[in-house]
Image (spheres, helix red, strand yellow):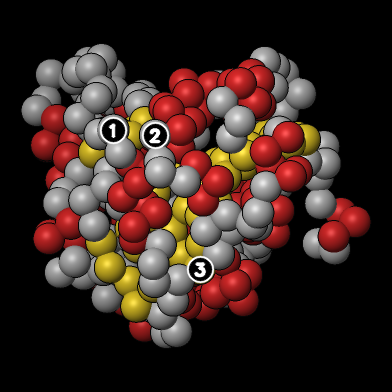
Amino acid sequence: MSTADLPPLYTTPAFRSGPAPRLSILVPTYDRDIRPLAAELLDDMAALPDPAAVELLVLIDGNPKLTGQEGVLNLATERDLAAGLAPSPRNLGRAEARNTLARLARGQVVLFLDADGLPDQKGFVARALEAAADPQAVVCGGRTGQRLDPPPRDSLLFHTHSQKREWISAAERNKDPEGNFLSANFQVGRELFLATPFDESFRGWGWEDTEWALRIGRVARMRHIDNSVTHMEYHSDAGWLGRLDRSVENYRLLYRLHPEAVRRHRIFPLIKALAPVSGWAFPKWLLLKLALWTALPPSIRLHLAKVRQALAYGTILKG
């Protein structure tokens, strides 16, 4: 994408007249109202000794139905803070949207946040700014469910998965920094990121963050800190299983690019074992019914969902 191809960027007076910041907070959104997250981030920015050290940029990823987001600029203007809003005329997808935001940013370090998150504690931006002292490192803040209400009965699979695999402390995440990488809340030097952007061959949902972590790990140190955000969205059980089904092609691409790393995934032995029957429709149907059967404990249903995922992923070994 050339500079001429970048989406238009509408900015506040403080953005246009102020110096280049040390930190750019970058948030892509497709259908999530960004104003609640922006309000909390702007509160944190206003409380900094030097608010000009940070800017907030939001990209609307090709969805003209998402209206009212100019409220972010209005709130930032009232507080004399640097902010920008970039409505993309087309849907870029998860990888290209992040790459585009990094190109629009001015900060030495860029902090990527998902639109469906909220900081767990006040002072989130100050802690991120402190971590930005090393632009050659990748710093991951973490994700939790601290601010989330208990999930509905039909949305327990992803919730249970998140509790086991994602909502963990920095100390635990640092035991396997790349393996515990999540793109929902991480920061990195802008120049380093632009030299190693997300692979835009990954379309749709899944695995583009895993692939990026494998590449960036060759040239930069990754560390995790406790500066978490809560994932403020439920995924219905049926909806999450559907996403796993749609992620097969991205997993196939990940396997083609990083076969040795994929073979080390804890699910890979099961994928390999089930590959001969991966084209059978009945086992997938039966496992779907069992994974959605709310009479079973969520932990057992999650295990069944993972078996079904391995069955679907078995096609990557068939050429």
Nearest the eye: 277 or 135: 135
The quadrant in which the C terminus is found is bottom right
Corner quadrant of residue 161: top left
Of helix, strand and loop, which one carries label 1? loop
Counting from the top left corner in percent of width and height, residue 246 is at 51, 45
Which residue extends farthest front?
Answer: 49
Quick one: label 1 or label 2, which is nearer the N terminus? Answer: 2
1 lies left or right of 249: right
Question: Which mark is drawn over residue 189?
Answer: 3
The residue that mark 1 highlights is 122
Disc 1 crowd, CA 10 A, few/some/many (<14, 14-19, 20+):
some
Number of marks in picture: 3
Reading the chain from its start, which is encountered first: label 3 or label 2? 2
Secondary structure under tag 3 reads strand
**Amino acid type of the residue tagged 1 in the rendering:** Lys
What percent of the width, then of the height, locates residue 101?
Answer: 65, 51
